[in-house]
Image (spheres, rainbow, N blue to C red):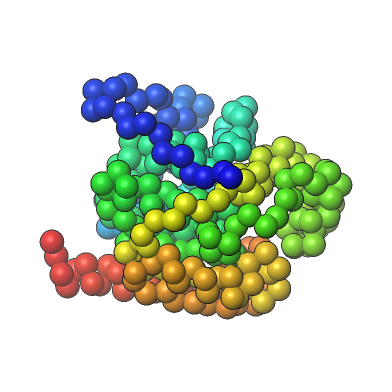
Amino acid sequence: MHTIERPAARGPSAPRPPTPGWFPGFGPSGGTATATATATATATSAGARTAPLRLVCLPYAGGTPSVYRNWAAHLGDDVHVVPVLLPGRGLRAKETPYTDLGALVADLTDALIEHELVGEYALFGHSMGALLAYEVACELRDRGFPEPAHLFVSGSKAPHLYGDRRDHTRSDADLRQLVRDLGGLGADDTIGNSYLERRLPVLRADLTVCETYRWAPRRPLGCPMTAFSATRDPIAPAHEMEAWRVHTRGSLLRHHVEGDHFFLNGPSRPYLLREIRAELARHLARRLDCPL
């Protein structure tokens, strides 16, 4: 049985390995950015550090930060969107993608701490990203850091329900068909197929991350959650999204929207963003009413 293994704690004086570009446009880029991109990153980083709240966004299997493009324009000036770039894609294309969730959680948590993103923050994740967001929230709590102000999970069944799929063992042809059936190729099948062909190794690695994961029992998180499911999503039906309720001692707000597994890229996207904005605005209002 595969479980999340906790890495040995690093001593306070132990050297921290250099962090590659986990957060495009936020802080160090691992030496891969151009001078122009570095200047942009510096300005963006400064803006992020002055925003009252940061929303760290985690991608679905095979996904990139581009799925969160333009989210900042919809969430207001008080929320800074920080997309996560995982190895094997974009500027990190030459890096080997993770196939084990425990290692990914440990390294991403290190990066969040290093970039000082674990003060006033929320987490959003879709599909694999939701599972990753949950485990990162638990890891941060276990290390003595604050839990997220809010955890948004989308298109992912509850963590304790994982373990019933073996899509990572499919042939390339079957993987292509799976993505097509889930609505992941978009309106233009030709462009979608070309994009998917380049993403197959990363997609297979990400699916391995999810499908070898087994939930390790632990106490529920204390933060509130919001869960989004879609009407035509066979991977995360409404009742399996409802099962997230056992993983929080706070509230769980459920939304069931029109769409397939990739509904966050479709017509339901404006509704999704409105609900995220409203929930974060409520948190910020409470924070102003009850200053520390």
Report the number of discs: 0
Q: In this rendering, does residue 187 appear at all?
A: yes
Residue 94 picture location, percent across and down = 62, 27
Residue 86 picture location, percent across and down = 54, 40
- Give left or right: position of 87 versus 5: right
Up/down of 137 relative to 274, above or below: above
Residue 41 picture location, percent across and down = 41, 38
Residue placed at 13% from the left, 61% from the top? 292
Residue 43: name its quadrant: top left
Residue placed at 41% from the left, 25% from the top? 18
Residue placed at 32% from the left, 47% from the top? 142
Residue placed at 36% from the left, 59% from the top? 219
Q: In this rendering, does residue 61 appear at all?
A: no
- Extreme front residue here? 1
Residue 127: name its quadrant: bottom right
Up/down of 171 relative to 182, above or below: above
Residue 67 picture location, percent across and down = 58, 54
Up/down of 213 relative to 237, above or below: above
* Quarter of the picture holding the N terminus: top right
Q: Nearer the viewer, residue 119 or 216?
A: 216
Q: Nearer the viewer, residue 153 or 139?
A: 139
